[in-house]
């Protein structure tokens, strides 16, 4: 694969040279993919929408920005409209646009492009670039979902750029530095196979001070006083950059790998749904002796922390306790366990287990519109048909056979539906933000640990403490089984949501519904009519129609503009 990366485009002269040279170089070198850093293309400060469009029209596949990303105010809106423009991955969380995407190169090959800002000597504080890029590279390994990946490290310090190169060695195809406007003579292949250069230089007039007319910068250095604005130099332009020619990293048998991937996702989805389905019956047993929600949730967090933390330790996985990781853990503990489990334990004492299994199937129907509103999924008639098939399955169970035994039980339904709503929020949160650079096991272990801290005062304050050492019968064993199953299934679910998307992961709810009925038959001796089996068939059709999103985790940028987690 032949990739061209052009350094910082500087002012009008740099734009004109780049717009002239990209078509010529694409034809002469038969380039597959072109990336341009354009953060200084408009007057040396930022990039305007019009100038961005001109560079893209000239043949650039992607434009990266930098610390001047939003100096031109129209970029705030344009970066949301144009998926081929990337702002830094570790920029302010409220910033528009995305910092990493997967794009289509020539021949349908997938290329991940990401940009991060360094922290050393930069004027404004930014989040840690290393943990930010680590999460993206973990999700999109070379030879799996993408065939090539390029990281633009935009910063001042050469040491920080070099550290990023070695940090990404073997995991990215190219790591190239930008921002200092001077091309370095250290182009090399790192030990792990990553192409690296400390700075690609700039596309501008080198008879200048990093692209600016010389007089004003020299005056400021000599006198310490500013007199005029910096202006881009308008002499002869040198186009500087990095050209990489290398074989794309492929998994063995691309079509076979894709089929194996989807099969694995479906099998994991089935395992998670079947395990969670059993917790409907187990939850009924756990509350049979009068245990209250917060007491059960507290011990569920404790057991999950021990199970998942133990697995992480055995596997030699470390925990990165960063601010993003803490934020992720707290949010997931609240919206993914505390609130939905409280509503579950409250409702399971008031509603039949079969009804609770049916209610959980509302998750994908709630997750899909949320994903559409967030721009993380596209409308699709096949997916709509799949969701309708799942809804039909719910109706076939609920309407003919499983109506509520008493009218009073209807009052508990709104509370029971809060659980699926928060599970839908959670799956979209994970798909949008990722897991803060943590693996699924570490992420859920950390979330469970914070859950222990959050629920302990609630448990004690509300008098819901459970002493497991006084007695250990069916209710206590059910709690242990529920917590263990939930911990393992939850970690797997988070991984599926990150790889295949929130809507596909939410199909777990259909399997939970079907398997919940089967578990009730096995453990409680319940029997059902043909309506139930027809419902299960409709649900399986729904699961098959709501396919995982593209193997790259995002649609081609020109088609949809979805983004990997950040």
Image: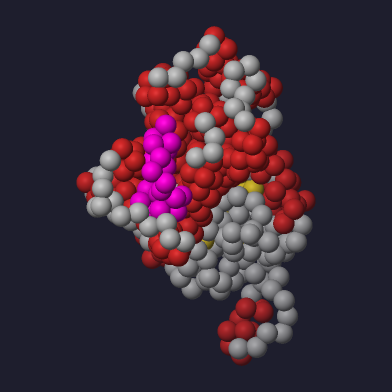
- Residue 362 drawn above or below residue 95: above
Q: Which residue appears at 64% of the width and 48% of the height?
A: 85
**Viewer-closest of 422 and 131:** 422
Can residue 518 be seen in the rendering of this structure?
A: no
Where does residue 170 sit, x and y in percent of width and height?
34, 44
243 above or below 7? above
Residue beneath the point at 61% across and 40% down: 412
| Residue 298 on the magenta segment | yes
Picture coordinates of residue 78, whole percent (x, y): 73, 50
Residue 119 at x, y percent in the picture: 48, 68
Q: Residue placed farthest to the left in the image?
A: 314
- Dominant SS of magenta comes to helix
Question: Nearest the camera: 285 or 150?
Answer: 285
Boundaries of the magenta span: 281-300
Q: Could you tell me how many numbered marks the image carries? A: 0
Rendering quarter of residue 368: top right
**Front in this rendered view, residue 131 or 474:** 474
> Was residue 489 drawn as part of the magenta stretch in this picture?
no
The answer to whether 200 appears left or right of 300 in the picture is right
| 331 vs 277: above or below | below
Q: Residue at x 72, y 76 (%)?
A: 229
């Amino acid at each position: 694969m032949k990739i061209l990366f052009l350094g910082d485009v500087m002012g009008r002269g740099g734009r004109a040279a780049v717009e002239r040279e990209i078509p010529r170089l694409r034809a002469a070198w038969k380039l597959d993919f072109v990336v341009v850093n354009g953060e200084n293309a408009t007057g040396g400060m930022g990039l305007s929408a019009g100038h961005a469009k001109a560079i893209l029209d000239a043949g650039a596949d992607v434009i990266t920005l930098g610390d001047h990303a939003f100096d031109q105010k129209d970029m705030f809106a344009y970066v949301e409209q144009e998926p081929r423009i990337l702002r830094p991955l570790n920029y302010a969380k409220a910033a528009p646009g995305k910092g990493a995407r997967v794009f289509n190169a020539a021949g349908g090959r997938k290329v991940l492009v990401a940009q991060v800002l360094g922290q050393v000597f930069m004027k404004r504080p930014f989040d840690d670039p290393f943990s930010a890029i680590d999460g993206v590279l973990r999700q999109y390994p070379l030879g799996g979902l993408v065939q090539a990946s390029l990281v633009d490290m935009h910063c001042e310090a050469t040491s920080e750029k070099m550290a990023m190169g070695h940090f990404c060695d073997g995991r990215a195809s190219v790591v190239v530095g930008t921002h200092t406007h001077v091309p370095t003579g250290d182009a090399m292949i790192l030990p792990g196979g990553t192409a690296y250069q400390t700075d690609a230089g700039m596309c501008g007039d080198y008879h200048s001070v990093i692209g600016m007319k010389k007089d004003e910068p020299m005056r400021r250095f000599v006198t310490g006083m500013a007199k005029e604005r910096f202006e881009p130099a308008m002499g002869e332009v040198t186009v500087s950059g990095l050209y990489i020619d290398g074989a794309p990293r492929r998994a063995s048998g691309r079509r076979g790998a894709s089929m194996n991937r989807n099969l694995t996702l479906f099998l994991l989805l089935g395992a998670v749904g079947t395990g969670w389905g059993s917790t409907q019956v187990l939850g009924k047993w756990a509350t049979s002796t009068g245990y209250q929600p917060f007491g059960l949730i507290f011990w569920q967090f404790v057991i999950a922390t021990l199970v998942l933390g133990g697995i992480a330790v055995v596997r030699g996985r470390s925990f990165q306790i960063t601010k993003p990781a803490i934020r992720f853990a707290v949010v997931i503990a609240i919206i993914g366990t505390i609130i939905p489990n409280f509503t579950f334990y409250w409702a399971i004492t008031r509603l039949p287990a079969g009804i609770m299994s049916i209610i959980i199937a509302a998750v994908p129907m709630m997750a899909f519109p949320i994903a559409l509103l967030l721009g993380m999924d596209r409308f699709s008639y096949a997916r709509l048909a799949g969701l309708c098939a799942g809804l039909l399955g719910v109706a076939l169970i609920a309407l003919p056979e499983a109506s509520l035994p008493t009218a009073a039980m209807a009052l508990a339904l709104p509370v029971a539906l809060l659980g699926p709503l928060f599970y839908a929020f959670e799956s979209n949160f994970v798909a949008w933000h990722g897991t803060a650079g943590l693996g699924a096991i570490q992420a859920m272990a950390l979330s469970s640990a914070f859950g222990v801290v959050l629920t302990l005062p609630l448990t004690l304050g509300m008098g819901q403490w459970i002493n497991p050492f006084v007695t250990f019968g069916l209710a206590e064993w059910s709690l242990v089984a529920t917590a263990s199953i939930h911990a393992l299934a939850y970690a797997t679910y988070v991984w599926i949501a990150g790889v295949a998307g929130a809507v596909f992961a939410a199909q777990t709810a259909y399997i939970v519904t079907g398997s919940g009925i089967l578990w009730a038959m096995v453990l409680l001796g319940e029997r059902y009519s043909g309506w139930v089996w027809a419902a299960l068939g409709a649900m399986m059709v729904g699961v098959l129609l709501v396919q995982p999103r593209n193997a790259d985790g995002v649609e081609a940028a020109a088609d949809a503009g979805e983004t990997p987690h950040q």
